[in-house]
Amino acid sequence: MAQIIAYGIITGAFYGLAAIGLSLVFGVMRHLNIAHGSLLMVGGFTAYWAFNLLHLDPFLSIPLVMAILFLLGAALYKGLFSHLDKLPEGQKIDNSMLVGFGLIWIMDNLATMLWTSDVRAITPSYTGKVWHVFPGVRLPLVGLAIVALAVLVIFSLHFLLTRTYFGKAVRATAQDREAANLMGINVERTYLMFFALSAALAGIAGVVSAVNYSVYPTVGFEWLLKAIIVLVLAGVGRIGRVFGAGLLLGLAEGISVYFVGPAYREVVGLVMFILVLLRRST
Amino acid sequence: MERTSMLELRQVDVHRRDVRILWSVSLRVEDGKIVALLGPNAAGKTTLLMTISGLIKPSKGTVFFEGNQIDRQPVHRIVELGVSMVPEGRRLFPEMSVFENLELGAFTPKARARKEQTAEEVFKVFPVLKERSAQMAGTLSGGEQQMLAIARALMSRPKLLLIDELSWGLSPKIIKDISETIVRINKTTGLTIVMVEQNVALSLEMADYAYILENGRIVGMGEAARLRESEQVKNAYLGLGDA
Amino acid sequence: MEYGGKGFVVSGIVVAVLIVFPLTLGTEHTLNLFVMLFITIILAHGWNMLGGYGGQISLGNAAFFGVGLLSFHFLAWNAGLPVYIALPASGVSGVVLASFIGIPALRLKGIYFAIGTLALAEALRITYGNLFPATLYIPTVQITTYTLLSRYYMGLATAVFIQGAAYCIIKSKIGLAMKAIRDDDEAADTLGVNLFKYKFLALVFNSFCCGLAGGIYAYYQTSIYLTVPFSPQWTFEPLVAAAVGGAGTLLGPVIGSVFLIILTETFALYLGKGYLIIFGALFIFVVLFFPGGLVGTWPRVGMFLGFRRRATKD
């Protein structure tokens, strides 16, 4: 059982990483970028090629992946999502969802054309190495790295949002956009940077996916669903909640697999999701 | 030698969704003066202030600040040039502390460099803010919020301060305190102020000069002292004179 | 575009051509194409009524499609009911599913409705794949008597029926109410329009269409792999078709579907899946800059070219 919990935590850390970028942008800017999953996929492939062509360890390639995704995210925002900024909130959310969806088509199919739909994975030398903590509990090293990564991201984001001027500008803009403008904050540029940041975060999750699971052009859609479930479970707001919800989902899936079997693993998350929505609607 | 005013509007038209709010508004504000905008509700006073700050763009006409045309500039650029606004309803950042709100007021690079010094000055003027420095802005009383809003606007070390509805929701004593503080700031630092204020008597006490706005048009202007005596103003707004 | 007398004549001619054409010019390839076109049109109309007119974006239409498909398969092939009963029944099965989830679902704010329906479709897809890990086959007796022509005409008849139904609904009081809700739902609410009722009606039409389409597909395909009934493609391709054609218009779904099929055919030769990229880009373009889609922008083009005085119909 302890083993299951351990795996659940690792999975949960990954789900948190996958969802954090999506959640932040939705919370601050009211854009629901469902192409977040495709950005994750690009991050995964970048790490894959970095590993195979440059022999770069996946975890070390994270800065590279972040940089590339940051630029990509900035371009996507400037070219597409920024046009939605002026719309009232309801329309903005709906339309950003539609734009994201069109992007999925473009990006996923482009990836298929470029890289074929073969499933890839990164297997560095330490794959499969395990740390026997106590009898019955084996912690894969990769899994530990993932959890450490998640913790690092949480603290970094917290620091960014509370201690830096950029982070305060983001929070201010989320609370009152016009007032933020009156402070001399360039709201457009703040949004651009923040969106690009969320793309970089998706990239991190993509690297994890490539190392711990696999990457293929449509992997983004799979993780997107997880990310959306986490988003809804967490509600909008704190970073901690997103990762907490991710943990919850990871653990719930792990425990259900133990009792019901692996076939219905996905359904657990979806059912939880639907239940939360139902509670929301009443 | 012609002296350019600190702020000048030339025949400014403003439309909101195809409805014209301001009609060919022209006015000047001289360096170091306090200028009041008077007029009935919905006359367009707030719109005018928002146009100066850049939140609204005029459909016709020009706005000059220190001789530079600013009506096409984005808001944050205008703030960098030295215009700061205390908006209607204060618009503080409720989930941030007093101190963080002040920090955000000093967002522009120039202001940020002198952040500590400005904060000291501001705390001297509004000591209660120093006491409540770590408190969430949303939990302050009405008067304290107004003080914070003004202090925050001052953090950018502006040359021109725009104040919209200073007295809104405040008790007479607090209004008196704050208005006296503002006049004192103006006299000691020479900060130019344009204010919109429902309370006409208060405005005319504080201001050097005033413009009267009705239905989006300037219908009167003059020295505050003279306007206090004018029949037009007395009848329309002060409820005095023979009616 | 106004649907006056001229519109009826044109539609009539088009339908007549479609009826006659397979008897003379139809190759097997084209007939197959048309059947898929009819299915897409029906799905697009379904989505359009809820998403375009009703303002609730559904991302889970695959759920109703799959349910309709399975119902038809069971009723017609297993239970032996005649096709002309099984088909409407498949539509009804979609409605039944919608009734279960619709009432709580419609109370959700737009985006939660969208992802909720998506979750539903995905849940069904996975559950179905787990419970029935087998390919569905048409019974052999049907294969020997299989005529593509009958599938074609069934598709055509259903598509025409749905187009007509959509027309009647939109032109009726219901359509008026929905337009009012779409333009300003708060105002409509204060005027006494029952928001929930009309959204539910739109959902019913949506699910009916998707169920029907599923039924036609079950009639048409000889073998159905387990990932197919609830595959996301049944939600997303009609959505994009309707949006590009013109969401919230009567002709949008048709024009968009035709456009999609033409693009598919053209690109299948050169780029394979490349057409999806083009369509995705077009879709984004439409969402950002031309919310009226092809149908909505055409009047403006017409005005630009000089043969139309006003840009929008009121």
Image (cartoon, coloured by chain):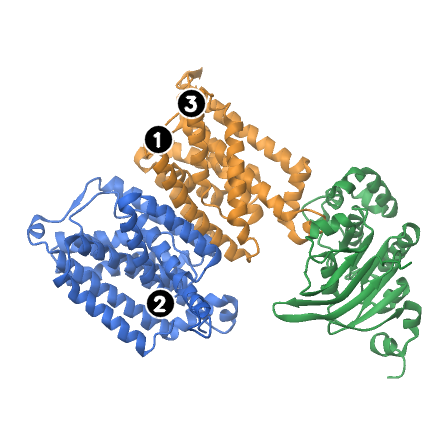
Q: Are marks 3 and 1 on the same chain?
A: yes
**What's under tag 2, amino acid-wise?**
Leu
Do callouts 1 and 2 mark residues in contact (Cβ within 8 Å)?
A: no
Judged from the image, the secondary structure of the residue bearing numbered disc 2 is loop
Amino acid of disc 3? Leu
Q: CA distance from mark 2 to mark 3?
A: 53 Å
Name the residue carrying label 2.
C250
Task: Report which colour depicts chain A.
Answer: orange
Q: What residue did someone put label 1 on?
A: A258
Q: Position of residue A21 (x, y in %)?
A: 52, 39
With A88 as the anchor, is A115 left or right in this view? left
Q: Position of residue B40 (x, y in %)?
A: 77, 72
Subunit under mark 1: A
Query: Chain letter of disc 2?
Result: C
What residue is at 49 percent from the left and 69 percent from the top?
A: C189
Vertical placement of A55 versus A69: above or below? above
Chain of the residue where label 3 is placed in the rendered structure: A
**CA separation in Å, label 3 and label 1:** 39 Å
